[in-house]
Amino acid sequence: MVTVKDKEKETLLKKILGKKKLLVIGTAVTIAVFLFFRFVLFKEEEVKKTEVKRGTVIEELILSGEIKADEHAELSFQTSGKVSWVGVAEGDRVKKGQALARLDTTNLSMDLQIAEADLRAKAASLDKVYDDLQGKEGSETFEEIETRTVAETNKDKAVFSQIKAQKNLADATLLAPFDGIVTYVAAPFVGTNVSFTEKQVGIVNPETIYFEVSADQSEVVNLSLGQKVKVVLDPFPDKEFEGEVVFINYVPKSDEVGTVYKVKVSFPTEEVDIEKFRIGMTGDARFALSEKSDVLYVPPQFINSDKNGKYLRLGRKNNKVYIETGIEGEERVEVIGDTKEGDIVYD
């Protein structure tokens, strides 16, 4: 006999089983939709392909570097002291020989006056000796020779002291060594005490900028003076600047790991925008090593290899066609073998 409680249990069990069935069906549908999108709709996007093309392939050596300048100086005073005058600010254009800053010259001026006074005294003493020995040329006694020699050397020392004092006074003023732009002023305020070990004023001539790269011993042998170069600076990725190799050092750089050589690439004057180019800007220099025209090529990522050699997936994804490669460039690689222009290649 079926009781009311038995019927209630049976109804509850059916509800639970119904929910589980719906959950299983829902999960299966979700997985099916995922697989449909994964392997059907997106299948074409995952398979990359290209065509075998005909054209020019250039083998390049690409070296990273940065902009520097031949005329780039950091100036400092020869002695420590207090800044008494500053004549420039950052960004100012200056001419060669222009005064930039000066130390307090009170003591240095006094040293020069003392040196000049001492020179007058020593010169007067020597004149007196010459006057006393007048007419005794060739007949001086040893004592008279000694007296004259001491007077002459005293005057010489006084002259040297005067020259030294003049130089010390002149060195209290920083002068621009070339035309250029002031890049920084360490002590822009009068009254600042500075040390002779500190760099005080920076100056650079934008007209002398160049691009410097480092080439290791296996790379530098492929470079030559006058070689044409294309430079792409990181701040201007869409523009190529034409350059030329103007210097290859004969000795390796001492501050680098390994054997690397400094290579300078000049920019034509018309290529240089001094309002935009800055010292330290980085980029890549492309050196053309060899070139072939009217050859078949594909992008390098479509060339595969196994134990039998290099191959292309030609015509369909799993069809291996073994080939040889010729000139290899950054974006194009020459292919030699059973291929023709227009063939479809899969990755």
Image: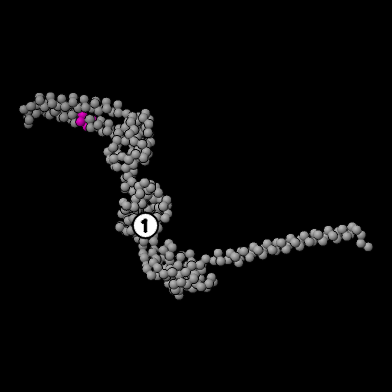
Q: How is the image coloured?
A: one colour
Instruction: Give me the residue at 34% from left, 43% from top.
Output: 204
Task: Determine which quarter of the picture holds residue 339.
Answer: bottom left
Residues drawn in magenta: 157-161
Q: Seen in the image, is 267 located left or right of residue 136? A: right
> Image point 19% across, 27% down: which residue?
119
- From the image, tell me which residue sits under label 1: 230
Locate residue 320, reporting x and y percent: 51, 72
Q: Residue at x 31, y 51 (%)?
A: 269
Depth check: give the residue in front, 229 or 251: 229
Q: Is residue 159 magenta?
A: yes
The amino acid type of the residue labelled 1 equals Lys
Out of 175 and 237, give the one closest to the viewer: 237
Give the crowd class for mark 1: few <14, some 14-19, many >=20 residues within 10 Å.
some
Is residue 146 visible in the rendered image? The answer is no
| Residue 219 painted magenta | no
Is the magenta region chiefly helix, strand or loop? helix
Q: Position of residue 99 (x, y in %)?
A: 29, 35
